[in-house]
Amino acid sequence: MTVRTRFAPSPTGYLHIGGARTALFSWLYARRHGGTFVLRIEDTDLERSTPESVQAILDGMAWLGLDYDEGPFYQTQRFDRYREVIQQLLDAGKAYKCYCSRERLEALRAEQMEQKIKPRYDGCCRNGVEPPGEDAPYVIRFRNPQDGAVVVDDLIRGRVTFSNDELDDLIIARSDGSPTYNLTVVVDDSDMKITHVIRGDDHLNNTPRQINILRALGLEPPIYAHVPMILGSDGKRLSKRHGAVSVLQYREDGYLPEALVNYLVRLGWSHGDQEIFSREEMVELFELADVNRAASVFNPEKLAWLDQQYIMQADVERLAPLLAEQLEKRGIDVSQGPDILEVTRAQHERAKTLDEMAQISEFIYRDFDGFDPQAAKKHLRPVAIEPLKKVRAALEALDDWTPEALHRVVQDISDALELKMGKVAQPLRVAVVGRAASPGIDITLHLVGREACLRRIDRALDFMRQRAEQG
């Protein structure tokens, strides 16, 4: 059997984290078994589906590197096929027209709720009724078996049994003739020869209904694997309130796609204690049997840690244009400063995301608003005035503005004043950067440039004098 998996999102919003993980698991399973990965866009919800959402899904998958072998297929282009199958079910007596009004169904539901009965259609039209009028509206319902059971041998959850008498006759075509989700999924999975359906466990209750429709059509069901949901840190289902849940938002926030993919694969799947996986390792090792049955908790700190590992190992030439994008979002023209490659090389081991790298690199391109209070209190003290004045004079006279020459300046002044180098370098760093953390002082001075360094040292000296005068 050639494995064929699919990812079938509804384009009613962005590609969210849960959907991306489902797509990843489906992609990995197909790649692991030398199979085919299909992308299907389930856009039958005409009111909520938008071209922008379709594009967001395609962009998100492209960014994550989840390439598909077939598709994208669009359900809105397959309505004739769905109508054909619906008619086939009607002709075989496996479906029927239901004329029940919305008012009747709402009253039925209210009565069942009051009696603490599970709300379900009561089969009023199951055995045929006279239409209330010549043009009376109707839906089409699937005639679900009333006895027996549906057994789902789920690759993740194990065997799950559903009694048919718990399932009502679901609607497969609305009053306007449009097909419903459970019908279109069945037709598409069959026509596209999907062998393994990997999806969120919120779809588990749909599975027995879909299996019954497949069998009514004389078709064999695919193999199912229902992936547990993702929870936020509060134990509730992951949603917007937990922060960024859109895949493309993570791109905007400066995460690397391979870090997010690595994090997603570990949300519910593991291979020993290994945390970091290359894509080749994921393909080689991934099996659905190793996916946990319990829900996973999304941990932003863990994702940030992983991203930092990938940033540290990434090629600087690849990171540089990405850092430039983040700086430009902050209103910085990187052409008006040092080579972005040099900046990236200096900062890429100091940040968890590219956005954070841009934040800690702003001082290189423009003056900061004020000194970090704690850093100023500790390092910009009267005792630092003389070292800073000497450093300023030496920097102003320096011909060779290289890291090596700048290091010698700081070292020579430290030696001349019989101070440890940190007693000179730290006040100088706070003066030039505004805070007590930056790359090595020689690299920092080199990147900031002579003019800005002298200007900022003057500012720091004024700051220290004013504080001294105020007592």
Image (spheres, grey):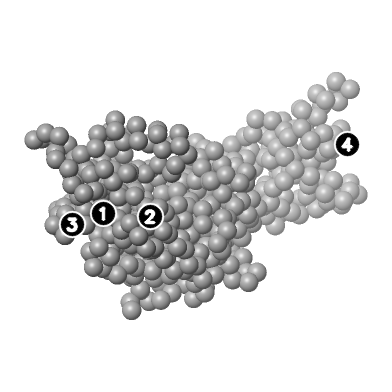
> SS at mark 1?
loop
Whether residue 199 is visible here, answered yes or no, is no
Distance, label 3 to label 1, CA atoms, is 8 Å
First along the sequence among labels 3 and 1: 3
Q: What residue did someone put label 1 on?
A: 143
Q: What residue did someone put label 4 on?
A: 383
Locate residue 302 relative to residue 324 in the image: left or right: right
Instruction: Report x, y in % for residue 394.
Output: 75, 44
Q: Is residue 99 above or below residue 438?
A: above
Residue type indicated by callout 1: Arg
Local packing at callout 2 (Cα closer than 10 Å; few below 14, some 14-19, many 20+) is few
> SS at mark 2?
helix
First along the sequence among labels 4 and 1: 1
State yes or no: discs 3 and 1 in contact (Cβ < 8 Å): yes
Q: What residue did someone put label 3 on?
A: 93
| Mark 4 vs mark 3: in front | 3
Can you say which quadrant of the picture contains the N terminus? bottom left
First along the sequence among labels 1 and 2: 1
| Mark 2 vs mark 4: in front | 2
Local packing at callout 4 (Cα closer than 10 Å; few below 14, some 14-19, many 20+) is few
Locate residue 235 relative to residue 372 in the image: left or right: left
Distance, label 1 to label 2, CA atoms, is 12 Å
First along the sequence among labels 2 and 3: 3
| Mark 4 vs mark 1: in front | 1
Local packing at callout 1 (Cα closer than 10 Å; few below 14, some 14-19, many 20+) is many
Residue closest to the eye, 460 or 211: 211
Residue type indicated by callout 3: Gly
State yes or no: discs 2 and 3 in contact (Cβ < 8 Å): no
